[in-house]
Image (cartoon, rainbow, N blue to C red):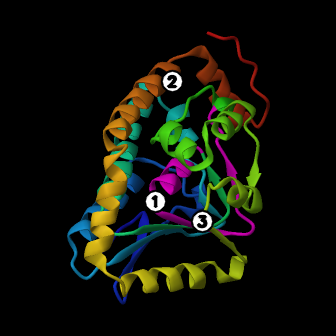
Amino acid sequence: MQFKNIIFERRDGVTIIKLNRPKEFNAFNYELFDDLIKALEFCTDDHETKVVVIGAEGRAFSAGGDVLLFKSTPDAGDTLRQLIKLMNTTVITIRRMPKPVIAMINGMTAAGAMSLAAACDLRVCASSARFRQAYLGSGLVPDGGWSLLVPLLVGLGKAAELIFLDPVINAKEALDMGLVTKVVEDGDLEKVTMDIAMQLAKGPTISYSLIKKNLNHAFFGLLESQLELEREAMTHAGRTEDVKEGLAAFVEKRKPIFSGR
């Protein structure tokens, strides 16, 4: 399969999907999500795919939503609503995938990229990786299931700390709090991830499907409602004066001055 915004590769039962907008730090836009969703849907039905790995080209896993996309539109709220619709489809497709999905995380992972990683079944992380929720700096709110998936991994108290204080989390801290599964040296990231994927690909794939179905059962309805709640909140936030200020400050590389309007 040929894509413009992702790299799609198959190896011995493992399909590797890499976000491929390295100059933009793999920031999410419509085209990237379109390609990612098509690739994931293909993997869902492909009998040769036993395991899916989601990684990224360049120095970042992803910076989250493409801020320039929101900055260049007269209605950031509507742009956010449409982009989050694709983000939500991506998250749901990963969770519904009857196969293990592994996030192979390098570099900065921010905002919706944390949601993407959290939606995966396992997360293998390079030692140089960093995590930041990064919503509040632009006057926005979490999306992509962040407010459900991240608390499920790290606990409500730690998730609240990540949201309200907005720290940059290093790989060891992410491992200690349960945000990632494993941390490896940068040069070993792909090898270790592929070793895990190959191990899974040789396992009882029908059992994996049943296990994932059971894991989803407890919270899937909540996830769907939470995704829509987040989308509504993001649309509302996207139409505030604070978002205009936050986006302008980001582009101008200065601290925002929020007014609460």
Q: Residues within 10 Å of mark 1 (few under 14, many from 20)?
A: many
Name the amino acid type tagged 1. Cys
The image position of residue 200, as x and y in percent, is 41, 80
Of labels 1 and 3, earlier in sequence is 1
Q: Residues within 10 Å of mark 2 (few under 14, many from 20)?
A: many
The image position of residue 45, as x and y in percent, is 20, 69
Name the amino acid type tagged 3. Thr
At 73% from the left edge and 34% from the top edge, which residue is drawn? Answer: 252
Q: What numbered label is drawn on residue 220?
A: none
At 29% from the left edge and 56% from the top edge, which residue is drawn? Answer: 96
User: Is residue 129 within the magenta segment?
Assistant: yes
Q: What numbered label is drawn on residue 238?
A: 2
User: Magenta span covers which residues?
Assistant: 111-135
Of labels 1 and 2, earlier in sequence is 1
In front: label 1 or label 3: 3
Q: What numbered label is drawn on residue 120?
A: 1
At 45% from the left edge and 41% from the top edge, which residue is drawn? Answer: 145
